[in-house]
Amino acid sequence: MLRIRSKAQAGTMQSSDLMVTVEPHARLEIEIESTVQKQFEHLIRDCVVAVLRRINLHSGRIMISDRGALDYAIEARVEVAVRRGAGSW
Amino acid sequence: MGDSNQRLRRSLLYVPGNSPSMLQNIPVFECDVCVIDLEDAVPLVEKDAARALAASFIRRYQDRNKEIYVRINGLDTPYYHDDLQAVLPAMPDGIRLPKCESPMAAERLDDLLTEHEEMLGCRIGSFKIIASIESPGGIMNAERIARASERLVAMGFSAEDYTASLHIDRPKTGEHLLVPRQLLLMACRAAGLQAIDTVWSDTTDMAGLKAECEHIKVLGYDGKSLINPRQIDVVHEVFAPKQDEVDYALQVVDAIVQAREQGTGVISLAGKMIDAPVVARAVRVLLTAKALGIVDVDVDEGVIYGTASVNDTSSAGGMKR
């Protein structure tokens, strides 16, 4: 099981991208801020949750600043941020 | 080497591997190949992110309207292994190998790709290679490199590193590149590979790009590496066949199909014998014309080259219009 050991980031604040920040936390918390929050927050959350489930992460604070990223980018950035925080590359 | 060598590769656009805004436009770029770059376009601290992003994109882009190659980091770096590990499961069409100096480098990559294909359970030879020749040493070894792997479909010239290694600036006139361009082209042709020219770095100078494209077309190059999507149309315009070339190619193919139907061995058109180079040129012209929407024909190479009977195909002879 993966565990976030230190604060880490992946991504950028450019259009079509997102910045993912992760840090250690006792429970799993996901915070989402997006330029398309009203329409797509639930879909972004579903995507993040699916990635965390696949890579077996059950705790940590996951903060998303989305700039209109598509699913493939959300999946990649979340996984990279978590793996950087977990030191698991 | 199969029909992978017959594909049109006029325009090979580099796309930075860590840029979602560029990656997600790949389906709408009208180039023949996109080369997702994990090498020069990606800073060292972002290699992991670029690999993950590129793999995630490729995995979702399986119904492709163009070939996808990935430029990995050089085999002399600590990064290439992780590059392959990350992107190959997503099934790109091939790998662009930078700084290929020797046949051993192409052989090494071939071995690695075979290992991955075995692990992934896909056909051996699925992943193709385009080798980038970037130095005088690479140019001198070009023919041996070209024959080093059955996966090679093309070799690309990179003038930036080549010019730097000559200790000169790169003048736009390009006279210092004539010899390496011709040597690379001959090595490619000797081994049955396509030849891809170097990038044109000044994205504001379209006239210069056009002049260079006309030059490399005369030399015999099949295409050019590009760094900006705005360069695609210029390359395609230069590589577009003229109408009389298309008309003649259609006549050649018609004559071949008629000869096949009549079981004639020798094929002639207007009193002139049609031999293999004429046929190959006609096929290439029609494939290019079709890609540009100039003609609407499907060229059946089985009929044209005599490997399939006319009756074996559903087409009206060698062409479907």
Image (spheres, coloured by chain):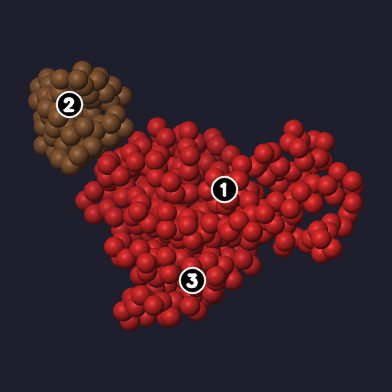
* Image mark for residue A36: 2
Residue toward you, B35 or B145: B35
Q: In terms of sequence position, does the residue under pointer 3 or pointer 1 come before the other?
A: 3
How many other residues sit within 10 Å of disc 2, few (<14), some (14-19) or many (≥20)?
few
* Image mark for residue B273: none
Drawn side of residue B196 relative to residue A3, left or right = right
Chain bearing tag 1 is B
Amino acid of disc 1: Ile
How many other residues sit within 10 Å of disc 1, few (<14), some (14-19) or many (≥20)?
some
Could you say where residue B161 lies in the image, as x and y percent from the top left?
36, 70
Could you say where residue A28 lies in the image, as x and y percent from the top left?
14, 21
Q: Colour of chain A?
A: brown
* SS of the residue under disc 3: helix
Which residue corresponds to the image point at 17% horizontal and 32% vertical from the top-left?
A: A66
Cα separation, mark 3 vs mark 1, equals 23 Å
Both marks 3 and 2 on one chain: no
Q: Which residue is mark 3?
A: B215
Residue toward you, B37 or B234: B234
Report which quarter residue A55 is drawn in: top left
Up-down relation of residue A54 to residue B229 (above or below): above
Q: Which residue is mark 1?
A: B294
Q: Are marks 3 and 2 in contact (CB under 8 Å)?
A: no
Amino acid of disc 3: His
Amino acid of disc 2: Val
Which residue corresponds to the image point at 53% horizontal and 56% vertical from the top-left?
A: B240
Question: Any idea which chain is the red one in this picture?
Answer: B
Both marks 2 and 1 on one chain: no
Drawn side of residue B162 relative to residue B253, left or right = left
Q: Is residue B116 visible?
A: no
* SS of the residue under disc 1: loop
Mark 3 vs mark 1: give the one in front. 1
In what quadrant of the picture does the C terminus of chain B appear?
top right
